[in-house]
């Protein structure tokens, strides 16, 4: 997922900050598991995403919980921004994985095409992207993406 730049907060906007997700809450990535057993363990650094789809899901969840450190750690050094800015008016609401190519334990590259749903100032919208992942020092990292449509 690409980063979005921040915009000034409106006085009537809800308080800034990520939604509070506990380890026992449903994982935002859409899989039927608790956050702590799913993407939370990747965010905490106790496990590494075994496939590029798992990394994509965990990066989406990192956008939901606003974990900039995880996003930067899982971004390829050649395309990684200096910082990740979160738009306070944006709320991620769901992820659809549409297609994956390669990206298993037996590959060094892979792609994930997805649609990430969000609201921006309460207006629903979606980001449709084909993301490219590569292995860097044995771990999957996000390299780049192209918008679809």
Image (cartoon, helix red, strand yellow):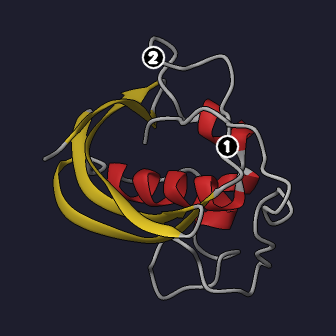
Whether residue 32 is situated above or below residue 127 in the rendered picture: below
Left of 8 or right of it: where is 60? Answer: left
* Residue beneath the point at 71% across and 51% down: 88
Q: Nearer the viewer, residue 88 or 112?
A: 88
The residue furthest top is 78
Provide the secondary structure element on which disc 2 rests.
loop
Asked if 21 appears above or below 73 in the picture, the reply is: below
Q: Nearer the viewer, mark 2 or mark 1?
A: 1
Residue 5: x and y, percent?
60, 32
Mark 2 neighbour density, 10 Å: few (under 14) some (14–19) many (20 or more): few
Point 56% across, 73% down: residue: 28
| Figure quadrant of residue 83 | top right
Viewer-closest of 42 and 63: 63
**Residue 2: x and y, percent?**
44, 36
Mark 1, Cα crowd under 10 Å, few <14 / some 14-19 / many 20+, is many
* 143 left or right of 86 in image: left
- Between 16 and 114, the residue placed more toward the observer is 16
Q: Which residue is mark 2?
A: 79
**Residue 36 visible to an observer of this rendering:** yes
Q: Quadrant of the N terminus?
A: top left
Residue receiving disc 1:
86
**Left or right: residue 142 compared with residue 92:** left
Where on the picture, by quarter, is residue 11? bottom right
């Amino acid at each position: 997922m690409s980063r979005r730049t921040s915009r000034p907060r409106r006085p009537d906007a809800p308080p800034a900050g990520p939604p509070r997700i506990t380890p026992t809450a449903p994982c935002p990535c859409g899989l039927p598991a608790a956050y702590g057993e799913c993407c939370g363990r990747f965010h905490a650094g106790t496990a590494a995403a075994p496939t590029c789809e798992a990394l994509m899901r965990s990066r989406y969840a990192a956008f939901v919980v606003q974990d900039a450190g995880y996003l930067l750690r899982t971004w390829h050094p050649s395309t990684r921004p200096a910082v990740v800015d979160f738009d306070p008016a944006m709320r991620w609401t769901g992820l659809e994985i549409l297609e994956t190519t390669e990206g298993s334990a037996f590959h060094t590259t892979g792609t994930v095409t997805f649609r990430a749903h969000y609201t921006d100032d309460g207006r629903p919208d979606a980001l449709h992207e084909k993301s490219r992942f590569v292995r860097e020092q044995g771990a999957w990292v996000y390299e780049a993406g192209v918008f679809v449509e």
